[in-house]
Amino acid sequence: MNDNNRTSLAEIGEQYGPKEKLIRMCRQNRLAMVSAIVIVLIIVLAILAPVIAPYGEAQQDLLARLQPPSAKHWFGTDELGRDVLSRILYGARVSLVIGIIPSFLSLVGGILLGLLAGYCSGWIDYLIMRLADVMLSFPSLLLAMAIMYTLGRYANSIICLFAALSLVGWASVARVVRSQTLSLKETEYVEAARSIGVRGRRIMLRHILPNCIPSLIVLYTLNVPSCILAESTLSFLGIGVQPPAASWGLMVNQSKSFLFTMPWLAVFPCLAIMIVVLAFNFLGDGLRDVLDPYLENR
Amino acid sequence: MKSAVKRVISMIPVLLGVMLLIFIMLRIVPGDPVTVLLGEHYSQETIDRLTAAMKLDRPLLEQFISYVLGVLKGDLGISYVSKRPVTMMILQALPYTVKLALMAAAFAWVIGLFAGIIAAVKENKIPDRIFMAFSLAGVSVPVFMSALLLQYIFAFRLKLFPITSDGSILSMLLPAIALGWNSAGSIARLTRSSLIEVMQADYIDTARAKGLKRRSVIFGHALKNSLLPVITMMAIQLSSMLSGAVITESVFGIPGIGRLATTSISNRDMPLLQGTILFTTVVIILGNLIADLLYSVLDPRIRSQM
């Protein structure tokens, strides 16, 4: 990003406040707006799951096993007679928690390490960035699998998933924050702050970090769906969320043996994953257009 | 040339870091490797002998150094379950993964480039919207979903392909499409944005102004330059496909690298898991290196900076 870009960005920022920017986004990008509504709706459904779900999360009805969709069981029942709709509603809780919390943890970790690397430079920078290189060289799914395996005997599966996904995710955040810190470090206002004796920590958190926030919001919105996908993939392989908890990936995994005869068992959880991930991706794309036009199109 | 050497040297700390992390992982996992390897009914003497042979009684640093030296010689340890060298098992699985990755990459490149070019040429018109929606859907769908869907429709319903793969080209087609789908989406998006950017350059205006047809401007002038970043991405994607399509291989039952990883986890076979992770990571690091070098070979502007 060169200086020209930044002045024009600053001008845009002066012209439109954050509120106007959001309103502009809603007008320009209907898809992003609809996605935001869908996300809110899913969050509400997930919170209200115990109230609105017709059956319990693991409530079995062995007399009504493997039933096709009907008025009584809208999405049918699985091999233990559990209501698929209810399990999808409960599964939304798992997916959202696992989408939101590890992304947040890796965001915080990435911000701190990225600021430190960009601001301090020298051997600290070298060390942190090589560590980020190392983390980014691992195939992320295999790394998450290995972490799940290594930590699996020390903690329960949800905690392990938090750890695995945040350890996988911080490195890319750190790279973005570092590169922005490097360019912001040279700006006049940072120099001014330093010249009146503001300390490094304050400069990083008060002067540099706020300017990274737009791209971080975008990065966060796009990290959530990749965490949700990673969770469902791990659960699909049987090393994510452990039964009897309801997770969409796990539901697909458990339906594998009935796939050809009772495809609805797999279809509904898959659709749920797709809708959530698409909504977050559309929202992230829309936010990027508004907040951070210069962030590289990934 | 100098910077290429520098780039290669910069890989060394990363590789060491990767090995260190993998080594630490082995230490964290509970269970003594010797008892796991031998089983329970062995005398203390045998256990001590094996501990010494595996250098497990040595200080950690020495163990790490001998691990690194072993890896450099191609020794990735012995599988707890099959009791065979991990290197052998990886080499046996590799041909399946290579075949799958090449086919998936070919699919992704053809579809991705085609869709990206059409989308860029018809920017903001209906074909563009359709292709871009498809590519976003491609990125948003979990691989197991597209794999299961393809398997259900084309193998089970239409019976055009075998349900599980035996390694033949025909049986590899569905897995390759499932694996290439995501990459096709990202290639299409990158091709589109890069081509649109190049089309705004002055020399494109010049070419148009001297009366060249739109088609020959796009294919003769613009495409070549816009493909530079795409080629880099292709190289990176190929290496990540080679590093094992864990999901695709598990859905279609292909005995490749990804399958080794999943079986090693369900069998609690730590050396095999370590070996596959190290192998795949090295493939990815090399892929990134090749992508960087390729980029500098193809782009004279970067070459002159070297």
Image (cartoon, coloured by chain):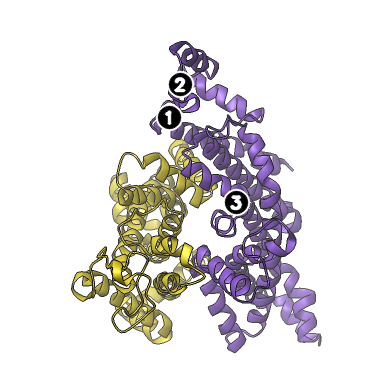
Chain colours: A yellow, B purple
Residue type, numbered disc 1: Arg
Marker disc for residue B100? none
Q: Quadrant of residue A212?
A: bottom left
The residue under label 2 is which amino acid type? Leu
Crowd tier of the residue under label 1, counting other residues whose Cα lies within 10 Å: few below 14, some 14–19, many 20 or above: some
User: In the rendered structure, which disc, 3 or 2, sits on the residue that comes first in sequence?
Assistant: 2
Residue reaching furthest to the top: B45
> What is the CA distance from the residue labelled 3 to the residue labelled 1?
25 Å
Amino acid type of disc 3? Answer: Gly
Is residue A19 shown above or below B63?
Answer: below
The residue carrying mark 3 is B244
Between discs 2 and 1, the one toward the N terminus: 1
Q: Which residue is mark 2?
A: B60
Question: Are there few (<14), some (14-19), or many (20+) residues within 10 Å of tag 3?
Answer: many
The answer for which chain carries disc 3 is: B
* Closer to us: B199 or B234: B234
